[in-house]
Amino acid sequence: MVSGGVGTGLRIIAASLLLVVSMGAGTAVAVPPPPPNPSDSELGASKADARAKATKVGQLTNQVAQAEAQLAQLQAQVELKMEDANRALVDLRTAQDEAAKAKADADAAKIAAQTASADVDNARTQLDEFAAGSYKQGSTVGSMSAFIGSKSPDDLLNRAHLLAAVGESRLDALDMMETARTDKANKDSAARAALDLANQKQAAASAAKQAADAATAAAVTARTDQAAAASRIEARKDAAESQLAAAQANATGLASQRQRYNAWLAAKQAEEAAQSRPSGGGGGGGEVALPPSSGGVRTVINRAMSQLGVQYAWGGGNAYGPTRGIRDGGVADAFGDYNKVGFDCSGLMIYAFAGVGIRLPHYSGYQAHAGRQVPLSQKRPGDMLFWATGGRIHHVALYIGDGRMIEAPYSGSRVRIAPVRYGGIVGYATRLL
């Protein structure tokens, strides 16, 4: 984890937030000029602005979720319409095949009907010839004169057979003609019906395909419009989040200014109180309640606080102060810790305890066993606190009293004072003094 630094002047001011009193002589170090002190109205306005922007971000987050849900619904509709179009296309091809078959059947029926018409014409010709012959003989059944005019019995028999044959041909021709007519009519009707049905199916399928294509286009357009709307809402959300971050930073900055001012005021009051005490009074004021014989503890805390605002640099820090960080092949490298001069969490402890001649290893896991371990509930200023995940210690901070600690937290941050975090904290504190 890495943090950025502030100027030397800021560190001097931060270091002076805790009144440093010489344990022997009782003389106080001069308190620097007061830092900015924002008014209550400014603090209230900054917090209200941050709350309002947080509300706006929440509203936009909900809108983004709703827009994305609508987009998912439209996507489902698009897929459904596209499947409808595919189905219509299949139906269209089927109808086209049926229409082609019906046309072929109609063509065959037409040829059959033409053949039947020829047969009817032939039968009609035979009938006409028979009728004409019968008329010439003066008989509608078969002329008797054909018998009377016979010249011999054989001729008479031949003429009788001829009349019988003509009569049978007449009846056969009539049957053929009626059959051909009926067959032709049936085939013509069937062909027309098949062709009409095929044309209807093709027209219906074509209409369905057009409707499906139109529905698909409409759904795709709706999805595109919704995606654009979702993107616009997402952009507004991003802008609102940026505004929220700025508002929160402003509120935090003003609160930090007030905190620094209060610390300065307390130091100023302590200085004035120390100056008003008799010269042999001993003892010293300060922000934290320290145990008896706590000169070493005060030195350790003062050294750590003198580095407030120094940037985090993984692997940085030694007994003499901040140093350039080192590469970790991961997060620290991403933050450029190897190009920064600062402290990591254990490096800050090394520097703080070097002021009383205690040398610590540059690893929080080893620092946890560098002194006496006491129950966390019995922690006191000057003790080291540790955090672990899966039983492995990964962070250390210095307890300074009043539920607060000083630490170099992570890459991208700075040395800071923060409330003790109890999530993941180990159940003991390590005491060296």
Image: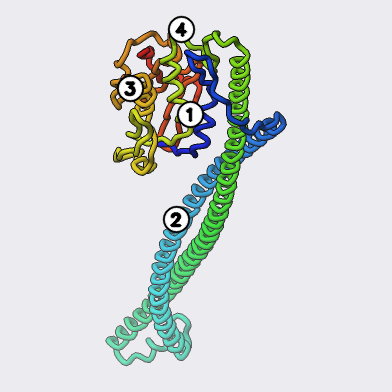
**Quarter of the figure with the N terminus:** top left
Q: Residue at x 34, y 90 (%)?
A: 150
For residue 393, the mark is 3
Circle 3/circle 2 CB separation < 8 Å: no
Q: Secondary structure at mark 2?
A: helix
Q: Which mark sits nearer the N-terminus, 1 or 3?
A: 3
Task: List the residue tagged with mark 4.
Answer: 292
Name the amino acid type tagged 2: Arg
Label 3 secondary element: strand
Q: Position of residue 197 (x, y in %)?
A: 49, 63
Q: Is the residue under label 4 in contact with that under label 1 (CB below 8 Å)?
A: no
In the picture shown, does residue 325 fall above or below 306? Answer: below
Residue highlighted by disc 2: 87
**Mark 2 or 4: the one toward you:** 4
Q: Please give the count of numbered marks on the rendered protein.
A: 4
Residue nearest the viewer, comparing 214 with 28: 28
Residue appearing at x 28%, y 24% in the figure: 361
Residue type at mark 1 is Arg
Residue 165 percent coordinates (x, y): 34, 80
Question: What residue appears at the point 47 percent right and 68 percent down from the top-left corner?
Answer: 195
